[in-house]
Image: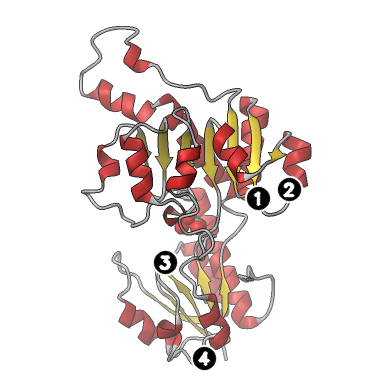
Amino acid sequence: MKPYVYIGRQITNEAETFISEHCDYNIWREAVKIPRETLKAELKEADGAIIPKVPVNQELLENAENLKVISNVAVGYDNFDIEALKEAGVIGTHTPYVLDETVADLVFNLILSGARRTAELQQFTRKGKWNKMDDPYFLSKDVHHSKLGVIGMGRIGEKICRRANLGFEMEVMYYNRSRNQKVEEEYEARKVSLDTLLEQSDIIVIMLPLNEKTRHFIGEQEIQKMNENTLLVNASRGPIIDEEALIKALENKDIYGAALDVFENEPLASDNPLLQLSNATITPHVGSATKQTRDAMDLRAAKNLVNGVLGSGPVDIIKE
Ligand code: DGY
């Protein structure tokens, strides 16, 4: 008998076909997110599941007696309560590797548009305000040959360093628990203290996972150590920055600007003050959102699910 799995979100045809070859399954095909009670009820019979981005905790898992694997279609897994998974004997999986280059591209997009203020200047131009040449208002700051500080040095951090060092000839420093020999040898990156990075970088990129240790890792104190020339970039998880402290700093022009793909609450509320700040460059959590990468993430999540329920191959198990 084939295992039975539940797919709680839309996935590509390729990923669905892969699952159908190995498992009996049901799928949530609606464009709206599956209601939590429906997902919970569906998990009752399932041996495994692909889920949308929802909190996975004891409450969700309490009746899921057959469940062996729960597959996240994202590299970040801050929606997983690891202790609850362990307690329930369920394997949690995620989708690393396939999105690294795509997220690094978006980070560079944020660096460039934040530093050169292209989003702000586009709005200015579209509004018909361009009525003279060489307006001093157009002046921005250089990216090439500037100092980049990366907080958190995993796989995506490495790709950012490669772009920074080989493409833009930036001086790269990083803050991380452990040394990363690859970025030191290949991209001339220097491991420094957090204070050195905050005080000396022209551009700071946050590349940390979200957990209880990293929540508000960048708060008022850390922002005060930056200077009025610093651009702060975040494409990892919003709650790593204390958003209220950041808004205050942007309003006071304590730093040059922020370029953000992620926020404390998503989607961003229409009255969030960041929307009114011209020194904030904003995108709607699209780090991995290219067609190719999202397709690859779906397929990887499908393989994790199938291999996990069958015990038949490599699985990206979340280990903590
Ligand atoms: C990820 O994969 O973690 C991206 O942020 C998409 O959620």
Whether residue 276 sits left or right of residue 74 in the image: it is left
**Which mark is in front, 4 or 2?**
2
Name the one closer to the observer, 206 or 67. Answer: 206
C-beta proximity under 8 Å, tags 3 and 1? no
Q: Residues within 10 Å of mark 2 (few under 14, many from 20)?
A: some
Give the residue pinned by disc 3. 53
The three-letter amino acid code for the residue at tag 2 is Asn
Q: Which of marks 3 and 4 is nearer the N terminus?
A: 3
Residue at left 45%, top 55%?
216
- Place of residue 84 in the rendered image (x, y in percent of width and height, measured from the top left): 51, 82
C-beta proximity under 8 Å, tags 1 and 2? yes
Give the residue pinned by disc 1. 176
The three-letter amino acid code for the residue at tag 4 is Asn
Q: How far apart are marks 3 and 1 (CA)?
A: 27 Å
Secondary structure type for disc 4: loop
**Which mark is in front, 2 or 3?**
2
Give the residue pinned by disc 4. 66
**Which mark is in front, 1 or 2?**
1
Q: How far apart are marks 3 and 4 (CA)?
A: 21 Å
